Amino acid sequence: MMTKSLQQLGDSLREILADKLVSVVESFNEITAEVSAENLIEVATTLRDNENLAFQQLIDLCGVDYSQFGQVEWQTNEASRSGFSRGVETGVTMGRLQFGDDLESVASEGRRFAAVYHLISYRHNHRMRLKVFASDDDFPVVPTVTGVWKVADWYEREAFDLFGILFAGHPDLRRILTDYGFVGHPFRKDFPLVGHVEMRYDPEKARVVYEPVSIEPRVLVPRVKREDHRYLSDKPAGEAELVETNKDA
């Protein structure tokens, strides 16, 4: 059940920002507002400066790849004798994606990459999430919000590094987590788990060299604690109690 405070925030967003927002969703006691890329800076500035909103602080920014949104390979509610379904079921899954595999996207054009901003208003004790999609899946670009919240600088560099989202107008958009020579963006759904290249130090060349990946592709199935004969109580009373105690531990 949504709180009165959350309801008031949703009403304020709809009233103040009106047609500048694509949608306002209230779910799980959280509010997510979606905005188009062309309205991002205007909306962000209003969220910060309007007295009834006053979202002065950006607490996090992350990228999202919706290319296989809704498709899951982890069916962990139940376990079979062979373990969870990751890497067990056939077909294209993230656990099996390797070199040359095609990613069958379920995201519509212009709805694959999104930047998500987590905001807090200390004045009103409100939190909200702002989301913007890049209009071009092949070349995802959204405006930088470093002019609105300076703290976005490194967050945007991280989203660029991991997802390949470009932030137009960013003062210094460089990789921040991966190496300068890194190939690709590792948090994209079509990035192979073993990577594209590996690096090592070559003592003869006295420098780091890059080579094709030599790791054998494999998918590990997690171990599952099952209700099997180890926990049956057809043993002497003392031994059965010990087994039950170990089970609970």
Image: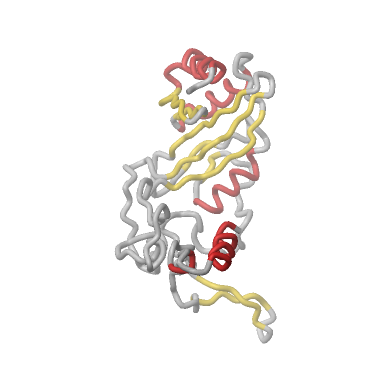
Taking the spot 39% from the left edge, 65% from the top edge, the residue there is 87
Residue 53 in percent (x, y) is at: 60, 18
Q: Residue furthest front?
A: 237
Near-viewer residue (88 or 144) = 88
30 is higher (above) or lower (below) than 181: above
Q: How many marks?
A: 0
Residue 132 in percent (x, y) is at: 47, 35
- For residue 111, which quarter of the picture? top left
- For residue 50, which quarter of the picture? top right
106 is higher (above) or lower (below) than 95: above
Taking the spot 64% from the left edge, 36% from the top edge, the residue there is 59
Near-viewer residue (240 or 218) = 240
Residue 76 in percent (x, y) is at: 42, 55
Near-viewer residue (222 or 240) = 240
222 is higher (above) or lower (below) than 13: below
Q: Residue furthest bottom?
A: 204
